[in-house]
Each structure stands twice: as C-alpha cells, then as structure tokens.
Amino acid sequence: MATAPTVESLEQAALRLQPDARAKLAHTLVESLSGLSRERLDALWLAEAERRDAEIESGKVKGIVWAPNTPVMAYWPLTVLTLSVSIRHGDQVL
C-alpha cells in the first residue's frame, strides 16, 4: 500500500507546476478553507505566523522588506491569499 504524500512532497510538486496551474491550485486551497469556523481559521493563521516567525528567528529564512521601488507583483501571492481569506470571513481590510 502506498503511503500518503507529505506536505513537503506536495509543495515540491506544486512548485513544478506552470504559474497558471499554481494559481488555480492556490485558489482551490483557499476556497477549501471557507467552510472552517472563524476560530479554527484564526488558530491556523496563528500557527502559520508562529512557524514563519520561528524560521526567521532561527535564520532559516530571511524576511521580505517592502521596498518602495519593488513592484507590487513581487508580493502578490501573499497579498491575494491574505485578502481572500480575510474578505471571505468578513474582516475589515484596510
């Protein structure tokens, strides 16, 4: 019997997709969260924020500084993901 794929193996496979396929996959994944309760979504986002913070603190990754001359498209995937989840759950996004 085959073992279930890991998050890491799925990430690697997804990153090999063409940009339009990755965008469709990202949309589908975000949509799949819409049925979760606000409390569960908050817990998931908090866990993700803590994971990212730990990676930065450990030096595993470097943060992205929003430079004045950087094209907005450089930040687009994160912005779309954040806005789509926030708007779906009635948050005020400024």
Image (tube, helix red, strand yellow):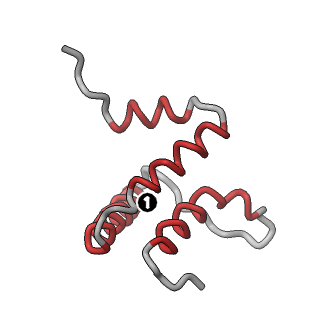
- Which residue is drawn at the image coordinates 48% and 29% (left, top)? 13
Give residue 10's position: percent from left, percent from top.
Answer: 41, 33
- Which residue is drawn at the image coordinates 46% and 55% (left, top)? 30
- In the image, residue 43 above or below residue 31: below
Give residue 86's position: percent from left, percent from top.
Answer: 48, 73
- In the image, residue 48 above or below residue 19: below
Residue 16 figure quarter = top right
Between residue 38 and residue 14, name the one nearer to us. Answer: 38
Q: Quadrant of the N terminus?
A: top left
Q: Say what amino acid the circle numbered 1 marks.
A: Ile
Give residue 20's position: percent from left, percent from top.
Answer: 67, 40
Other-residue count near label 1 (Cα within 10 Å), few / some / many at <14 / 14–19 / ≥20 = few
Residue ranking furthest to the right? 69
On the picture, is 68 further left or further right than 37?
right
Total residue callouts = 1
Residue 4 figure quarter = top left
Q: Quadrant of the C terminus?
A: bottom right
Residue ranking furthest to the left? 1
- Which residue is drawn at the image coordinates 58% and 40% (left, top)? 22
Between residue 57 and residue 74, name the one nearer to us. Answer: 74
Residue ranking furthest to the top? 1
On the picture, is 80 further left or further right than 9?
right
